[in-house]
Image (cartoon, rainbow, N blue to C red):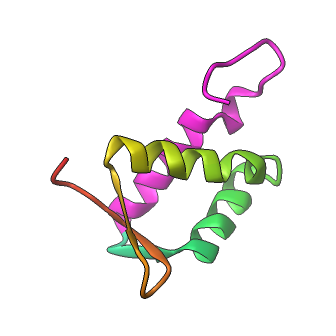
């Protein structure tokens, strides 16, 4: 999903969705999973729903996201 091919729409790529997620997390302290998914779908369309979990995984592996299990929300990890 990260490596693009000629059929992928760059507007709903994992990198673009990840950038949008980071922008949202920078604006808020933490965001609930469902609220974040709704913001992505509202802004980028329903096709972005397929790549949303991959974007979250990508950001988590880079150390940019912190998952708060108690509230089922994500927080921007500025230390890494």
Tell me what residue is drawn at x 42 percent, y 53 percent: 23
Dominant secondary structure of the magenta stretch?
Answer: helix
Check residue 31 for magenta coloring.
no
Check the image and name the residue furthest to the left: 79
Q: Is residue 7 or residue 53 the one in the foreground?
A: 53
Tell me what residue is drawn at x 26 percent, y 58 percent: 77
Q: Position of residue 11 (x, y in %)?
A: 68, 34
Q: Position of residue 48 (x, y in %)?
A: 74, 48
> Seen in the image, is 41 located left or right of residue 67?
right
Check residue 16 for magenta coloring.
yes
Q: How many marks?
A: 0
What is the quadrant of residue 8 in the picture?
Answer: top right
Tell me what residue is drawn at x 72 percent, y 62 percent: 42
Q: Which residues are magenta?
A: 1-27
> Seen in the image, is 44 located left or right of residue 61?
right
Q: Quadrant of the N terminus?
A: top right
> Seen in the image, is 46 located left or right of residue 44?
right
Check the image and name the residue furthest to the bottom: 70
Q: Position of residue 13 (x, y in %)?
A: 65, 34
Tell me what residue is drawn at x 65 percent, y 65 percent: 37
What is the quadrant of residue 35 in the picture?
Answer: bottom right
Q: Position of residue 5 (x, y in %)?
A: 75, 14
Relative to 36, say whether 40 is above or below: above
Relative to 72, say whether 63 is above or below: above
Q: Is residue 12 or residue 3 the one in the foreground?
A: 3
């Amino acid at each position: 999903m990260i490596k693009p091919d000629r059929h992928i729409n760059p507007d709903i790529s994992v990198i673009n969705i990840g950038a949008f997620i980071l922008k949202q997390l920078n604006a808020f302290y933490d965001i609930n999973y469902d609220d974040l998914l709704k913001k992505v779908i509202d802004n980028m369309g329903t096709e972005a729903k397929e790549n949303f979990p991959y974007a979250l995984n990508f950001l988590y592996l880079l150390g940019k996201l912190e998952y708060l299990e108690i509230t089922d929300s994500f927080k921007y990890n500025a230390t890494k």
